[in-house]
Image: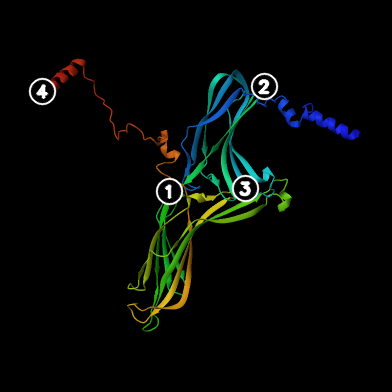
Amino acid sequence: MDMFSSKEKRKSLTLHGRASSPSSKAKNSPKKSPNLAAAKPAKLAVEMESPPLVFHGTPTQSSGALLSGQILLAVTDQDITLETFTMVLQAKVTTRKPVSKDCPDCTTKSTALFTWKFLTEPNRFAHGTHTFPFSYLLPGHLPATSHGELGLIDYVLHAKAITSLADTLTVERLLIVQRALMPGMDKTSVRIFPPTNLTATVGLPSVIHPIGSFPVQLRVTGIIDTSIKDVQRRWRVRKMNWRIDEHSKIISAACPKHARKIGGEGKGVLHEDTRTIGGDDLKSGWKTDFDSPGGQIELEFSAALKANSHPVCDVDSPTGLTLTHNLVLEIIVAEEQTATKSGKYATPTGAARVLRMQFKLVVTERAGLGVSWDEEMPPMYEDVPNSPPGYTKMDDYDGDLPQDEELERMGREHGTSSTR
């Protein structure tokens, strides 16, 4: 009876609002102020002045790319004192297949290419914007920026300044470095398919680009076999398909902490990947000529890389990342037999073959109208010829010099003769 009455009392307290619920406590509790970060006394920014960083030519021929710009220091306080102010150009190689999945040292390897020290001693800066110019010549043998399926290559500018009050100012700028190879003469490749007499000749451009199409010329000869008397056997194309494969390779090296997993330091794990970044099937469009000696089949089509596949240019980096591309052609031919040269009544023999060919493609960025930095510079002092040119022979005058009166008389005589 007492228990029942105590329950009723607690219930009545709740009904009359004397007992507070958790929701009511949350509503009545004071709101906590958000945690606001302390304002920095200054800000850093990177302003680029150089054109896009493009290596013109192969790694052994390129003269590099000129990097130039300035660091902007915007002081928001009345004044600040900087103890140190440096900037580092880093090359970062990131593998998507690290030896240890959660280890940042196994995932990313950073190399400092150059370091700028803008201050040799502490310096005071007043309110306003201050500029610090910088420049550097990127060597032409470096690999271009690449974001492949197995690894990434990036170039980053990282600036850091420390004030006298121990405030740290930082800024990062990602650099896009490209490589452009000038197009040359078209390449012609020949493939032979024994035991038949079929021979395929393929014409391809020397370089292709991630955006845009390129022509492919194909000619197949030796499609007619007249070794049997009064019988002509010939090959006819039924179908053709092409595709462009991107091959990726990377060597994932381990940090000293996880080197024991792969047998010690200095070793790595090779990873390979292949994906198709373009292709199509052709069921018509070729020309068949049975009247020419041996017969031939001609075909010309346009191929291109799929834009949504995000193709990557060729890379051969000493860090272990390699990207190459191949064009794969497959031609399905069927054999038929006829008893007359006209070929009006041909009978299939049931024999068929798949002619498979593979050709290397070089994928590079477009060079456009750009030229390398050394070709834009004016000629150096030692390249300018001597001016004026020297005389081959000059004799000294040993006689007496004429007097002033004689010079005046000679001038008057010369003027009188010229008027006549």
Q: CA gap, disc 1 to disc 4?
A: 65 Å
Q: Residue furthest top?
A: 405
Q: Give the residue number, with chain letter if any, for mark 4.
A: 419
- Front in this rendered view, residue 398 or 34: 34
Residue density around tag 1, few if under 14, some if 14–19, many if 20 or more, within 10 Å: some
Quarter of the rendering occupied by the N terminus: top right
Q: Give the residue number, with chain letter if any, for mark 1.
A: 182
Q: How many marks?
A: 4
- Disc 3 vs disc 4: which is toward the camera? 3
Q: Give the residue number, with chain letter if any, for mark 3.
A: 95
Q: Secondary structure at mark 4?
A: helix
Mark 2 or 1, nearer chain start: 2
Question: In the rendered image, which quarter is residue 301 located in?
Answer: bottom left
Q: Give the residue number, with chain letter if any, for mark 2.
A: 165
Q: Name the residue: 62% across, 48% down.
A: 95
Point out residue 68 in the picture as x, y percentages from the top left corner: 50, 33
Point out residue 345 in the picture as x, y percentages from the top left corner: 36, 79
Visible residue check, residue 295: yes
Mark 3 or 2, nearer chain start: 3
Residue density around tag 3, few if under 14, some if 14–19, many if 20 or more, within 10 Å: many
Mark 1 or 4, nearer chain start: 1
Point out residue 77 in the picture as x, y percentages from the top left corner: 59, 19
Q: Are marks 1 and 4 in contact (CB under 8 Å)?
A: no
Mark 4 or 2, nearer chain start: 2
Q: Are marks 3 and 1 in contact (CB under 8 Å)?
A: no
Q: CA gap, disc 2 to disc 1?
A: 53 Å
